[in-house]
Image (cartoon, rainbow, N blue to C red):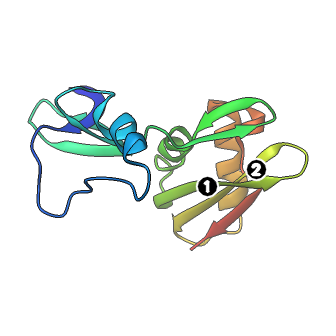
Amino acid sequence: NISGALCISQAWPGMARTIYNDHKRYLETYLAPYPGFFFTGDGVYRSSEGYYQLTGRLDDIINISGHRLGTAEVEDIVNHHVAVAESAVIGYPHDIKGEGKMAVFLGYTQETLTAELRELISKKIAKYAAPEYVQVT
């Protein structure tokens, strides 16, 4: 039972080998963080049985009114709701806050689902973390 960064020790067919016109950025982003490994940018959880579960992008941060918030943090909370099968949280430009949050939840359509999930996020993280726009699919 351990969590961390997903890194790969060997090359594979089709892997990126550079960033167009910016090879230095490629080296700094994918090879420098963990020398000898390719850093995917994803977080991962490995169970005691050896199963892997991707937990989200480690660099996917939304800056809301000076508060840095990981999208995976919000997604993890709403995915525990019985009516949610999967979720995605993204940032969008906001004139006042810098960035706003939009959440997409895949689950059962309920009139109260949006309110329940906003309340859940407000209690578990903070009021500013509740998404302004919600799309239930």
Q: Quadrant of residue 37?
A: top left
Crowdedness of circle 2 by 10 Å Cα count: few (<14), some, many (20+)?
many
Determine which residue is flagged by label 2.
Answer: 100
Residue 59 in percent (x, y) is at: 49, 39
Does 48 sit left or right of 35 as displayed?
A: left
* Foreground of the two, 56 or 86: 56
Numbered disc 2: secondary structure: strand
Task: Specify the amino acid type for callout 2.
Answer: Gly
Q: Is residue 128 above or below residue 11?
A: above
Give the residue drawn at x 47%, y 43%.
Answer: 76
Q: Are marks 2 and 1 in contact (CB under 8 Å)?
A: no
User: Around disc 1, counting alpha carbons within 10 Å, would you say few (fewer than 14), some (14 to 19), or many (20 or more)?
Assistant: some
- Taking the image as shown, residue 24 lies to the left or right of residue 118, namely left
> Is residue 134 shown above or below 45?
below
Query: Quick one: quadrant of the C terminus?
Result: bottom right
Under tag 1, what secondary structure? strand
11 vs 40, nearest the viewer:
11
Residue at far right of view: 96
Q: Residue at x 18, y 64 (%)?
A: 14
Left or right of residue 9, residue 100 in this image? right
Q: Would you identify the image quadrant in which residue 20 lies?
A: bottom left
Q: Position of residue 28 (x, y in %)?
A: 38, 34
The residue depicted at 14 percent of the width and 42 percent of the height is: 51
Residue drawn at x 71%, y 68% as measured from the top left: 111
Q: Position of residue 25 (x, y in %)?
A: 42, 42
Q: CA distance from mark 2 to mark 1?
A: 8 Å
Label 1 belongs to which residue?
Answer: 90
Q: Which sits earlier in the primary sequence, circle 2 or circle 1?
A: 1
If the image is split into quadrants, where does the N terminus sit? Answer: top left
Q: Position of residue 97 (x, y in %)?
A: 84, 42
Residue 7: numbered disc = none
Tell me the amino acid under the disc marked 1: Ile
